[in-house]
Image (spheres, grey):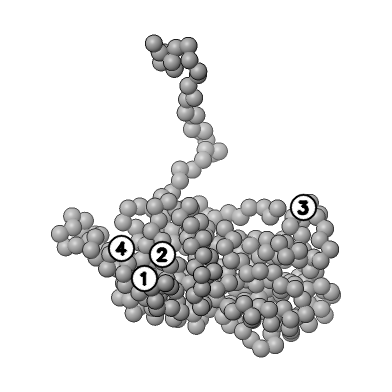
Amino acid sequence: MSSPTGPEGGLPVRMPRPRQPGRHRRPEPVVAPEGAPALVLAVPGTPTSATRSLAEETLSIARSELPGLDARIGYVDSDGEEFPALETVLTQTAAEQAARTAPDSADENAGQAPAAVVVPLLAGPDAALMRRIRQAVLNSGSGAELTDVLGPHPLLAEAVHVRLSEAGLARADRARLFTVATAADGIILATVGGDEAVQVAGITGMLLAARLAVPVLAAPLDEEGAISRTAEQLYASGSQQLALAPCLIGPEVPEDLLTAAAQEAGCQSAEPLGGYPAIGKLVASAYGAKVGIAQQSPQGAPVR
């Protein structure tokens, strides 16, 4: 025998918790609608197994932000089975969409949506790279749409802060007044992509300066002498211990370029942003904005 509330004489049955009403109610998770365009992550730089792992980790986070997402990887500098070129991935994606939306399809509007949305794995603008990505999109004939780069965004400042703290070059938490003996009192925020990239990195630099309460100046890695000139500016303003902080995800620059820049400035360097979770969140957000999927704006977490 049993009662409406559970088995008679047995253990109590756990009933589902009622939804919390009002402003504190958790939002329903957003999922990618059926038939939504694929997200193709355009990965710059020389393809390696490490680059592929980074891209896969980034897309894993993006899928957790937007369940049901069809996410793929295309390499800007490759054309092979192991590291498929961006143009090849887009052509294949368009062919798959065409097969799904055959002429006898009942959905007359199915063919109007782009086959894919391309999100560049770039923290800031790089005119030369973006030109190559646009050309790959055009050559593919896929009708894919291209989003902007991921920055500037407060989450990028958070990510740079975390990388600095991991290298022992910044306090992890200002509020706790945690002292780091090697903490820098001046930051060179390194980027690539010319003047526009430096200007965009400068916005992230202002956010980072507010977090760390130290001066931060953006400088291009790909301009001869720029890093040393920026170091001299910081020294002239009173800084005594500098740090190089890449405002870069990683694949877009050779590793030896960062090493040479740190030697040029005579300081230690933090790691690139890499697979920091904020990158995946920003990728999902860029895709969602392009296809009109309403999402909460990605929020950062306090650095611990």
For image coordinates 79% across by 68% down, the residue present is 184
How far apart are the alpha carbons under marks 1 and 3?
46 Å
- Left or right side of 20 for 183: right
- Left or right side of 107 for 43: right
71, above or below 77, in the image: above
Residue 221 coordinates in the image, percent (x, y): 64, 81
- Give the residue type at disc 2: Arg
Residue at mark 4:
113
Q: Report helix, strand or loop for mark 1.
A: helix
Number of marks drawn: 4
Residue at mark 2:
72
Camera sees residue 244: yes
For image coordinates 76% across by 66% down, the residue present is 169
Residue at mark 3:
175
Residue at mark 1:
89
Q: Report helix, strand or loop for mark 4.
A: loop
- Give the residue type at disc 4: Ala
Of labels 4 and 2, earlier in sequence is: 2
Residue 297 coordinates in the image, percent (x, y): 53, 55
**Tag 1: Cα neighbours inside 10 Å, few (<14), some, or many (≥20)?**
many
**Tag 3: Cα neighbours inside 10 Å, few (<14), some, or many (≥20)?**
few
Of labels 2 and 1, earlier in sequence is: 2
- Give the residue type at disc 3: Ala
Q: Report helix, strand or loop for mark 2.
A: strand
Which is in the foreground here, disc 1 or disc 4? 1
How far apart are the alpha carbons under marks 4 and 2?
18 Å
Camera sees residue 112: no
How far apart are the alpha carbons under marks 1 and 4?
17 Å
